[in-house]
Amino acid sequence: MRLVTFSDGSGTRIGALDAAGALRDIAAAAPSLPRDMLGLIAAGAAALAAARDALGKAPVVAGAKILAPIPRPPKNVFCVGKNYHEHAKEFAGSGFDGGAKDVVPPFPVVFSKPHTAIIATGEPILSDLDPTGGLDYEGELAIVIGQGGRGIGKAAALSHVFGYTIINDVTARHLQKRHSQWVLGKGLDSFCPMGPAILTADEAPDPTKLRLITHVNGEKRQDALVADLIFDVPTLIEAISAAITLEPGDVIATGTPVGVGIGFTPPKFLQKGDSVRIEISGIGVLENPVA
């Protein structure tokens, strides 16, 4: 099931995209369910089953706006850097790595983006917030946590996944390099496009089979299987939850494959009027203009 958060004239609530891509109003078909995504996730397996049962009788909604599936997660969005082998190499050779010693990191590199960076598919990435002219894209698979916890081991990690969505880890490369860390280069307003939907975990029992493709203005830039991750989904959940309690609705962006703008000579930075389109099999398409 592909769950979404949407708004229309009667408010904001949860829905789902059916096989034909039509938006169905889950809340109308099952009014006892929570109307927000965090509430649905926290309500557990029974609520998800009820939402699935409601999909077949849920009315189609026309003209609604699809929002980010989780506009405000419980915490900042967790993000993982340099987590595909070939991207780690391209980043190390780009001159933007800030002097990191290891091309391929021995442990996950984790940073975060604030919720104020989150925007929905179709909403603009605000290029003027990066006055340095180094705007870049990073298509990523993101994990949505279902059952929370601390000290989650790899063997149990996938049972804690509610589903998967797409994130564009938009980056101001010169700011990233200037500050020798990543929050001030990656956490700017509008720098975390998310969506369009959450693919529930039962639809992707083996996330390594998912494929990510990024186009900029119709030109393919990234194309990789999630199997190419250096640190896989269970490893990331184990590492982050070791001493940080994960909560229902927490989001973990797993890293980007080779093909980002700084990997080209000269770099292909984003410009006003560009469009970034990220697709992951089963989830859908996240597309945002650069304004």
Image (tube, grey):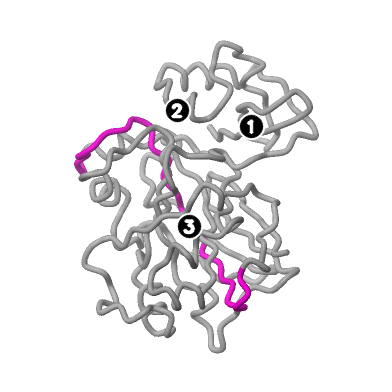
Q: Which residue is mark 1?
A: 18
Q: Which residue is mark 3?
A: 140
In the shown orientation, is residue 47 left or right of residue 98? Answer: right
* Residue at 56% from the left image edge and 40% from the top image edge: 71
Q: Where does the magenta region start and end?
A: 130-155
What's under tag 3, amino acid-wise? Glu
In the shown orientation, is residue 108 left or right of residue 209? Answer: left
In the shown orientation, is residue 255 left or right of residue 127? Answer: left
Q: Mark 1 packing: few (<14 Cα in 10 Å), some, or many (20+)?
A: some
Dot 2 or dot 1, earlier in sequence? 1
Q: Which residue is mark 2?
A: 41
Q: What SS does tag 3 mark?
A: strand
On the image, the x and y values in percent for residue 106 come to 21, 67
Q: What SS does tag 1 mark?
A: loop
In the shown orientation, is residue 233 left or right of residue 127? Answer: left
Q: How many marks?
A: 3
> Against 204, is 255 above or below?
below
> Against 92, is 278 above or below?
above
Q: Nearer the viewer, mark 1 or mark 3?
A: 3
On the image, the x and y values in percent for residue 228 come to 36, 62
| Tags 2 and 1 touching, CB below 8 Å | no
On the image, the x and y values in percent for residue 28 come to 67, 16
On the image, the x and y values in percent for residue 92 come to 36, 80
Asked which quadrant contains residue 111, the reply is: bottom left
* Residue at 42% from the left image edge and 59% from the top image edge: 225
